[in-house]
Amino acid sequence: MRRRLVLALCVAIVACHRKPSIPADVVARVGDRMITLADYKRYLERNAGTDLSQVGPEVSSAMLDQFVEEIILSEYAAAHGVEIPAEQIASAVRNDAGATVIEKRDDMRRQKLIGTISSDVPAPSDLEIRSYYDQHPSEFHSGEEVHIRQILV
């Protein structure tokens, strides 16, 4: 009897500490936030103007990475008190028929966070620009270019 009770308690303890299962349609997870396949397809359509079946695996992977990075930025902004008034979000959703409230809120949070951070960075001086240009010449040279005026078929 005592052995059964101990066994039942062990099973109960293990069951309580088990992580919840992840639904089959989840393609990524950022903290507690699940990104479903439908979310990713909508993101791909809105940002690349194409369907998942039309892109290769490399592009799909890069777009998923970008989506995750955007969510991380949004979560960071939220954690650091970047908030957008509900009226502004509602107005933005009305002006962009395909967007959801969460997508618009996250986008606006990211923009506000980036704006706040970048406003603290002073513009480079002409001397700093020249110095960077002189130290990184390979970044500013391109190969030969051809300009086409007309293509006849």
Image (cartoon, helix red, strand yellow):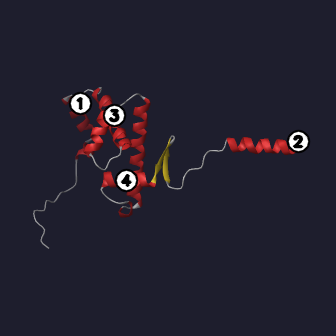
- Give, as a three-letter code, the residue at label 1: Glu
Between disc 2 and disc 4, the foreground one is 2
Residue 150 place in picture, x, y as percent: 10, 65
Residue that carries the numbered disc 1 in the rendered image: 128
N-term mark: 3 or 4: 4
Dot in front, 3 or 2: 3
Residue labelled with disc 4: 42
Q: Quadrant of the N terminus?
A: top right
Residue for badge 2: 2
Please report contact status of discs 3 and 2: CB closer than 8 Å, yes or no.
no
Labels 1, 2: front one: 2
The three-letter amino acid code for the residue at tag 4 is Arg
> Reading the chain from its start, which is encountered first: label 1 or label 2?
2
Q: Which residue is mark 3?
A: 86
Labelled pair 1, 2 in contact (Cβ < 8 Å): no
Q: Residue furthest left?
A: 149
SS of the residue at dot 1? helix
Residue at the farthest right position: 1
Q: Which comes sooner in the sequence, label 3 or label 2?
A: 2
Looking at the image, which residue is at 62% across and 44% down?
A: 19
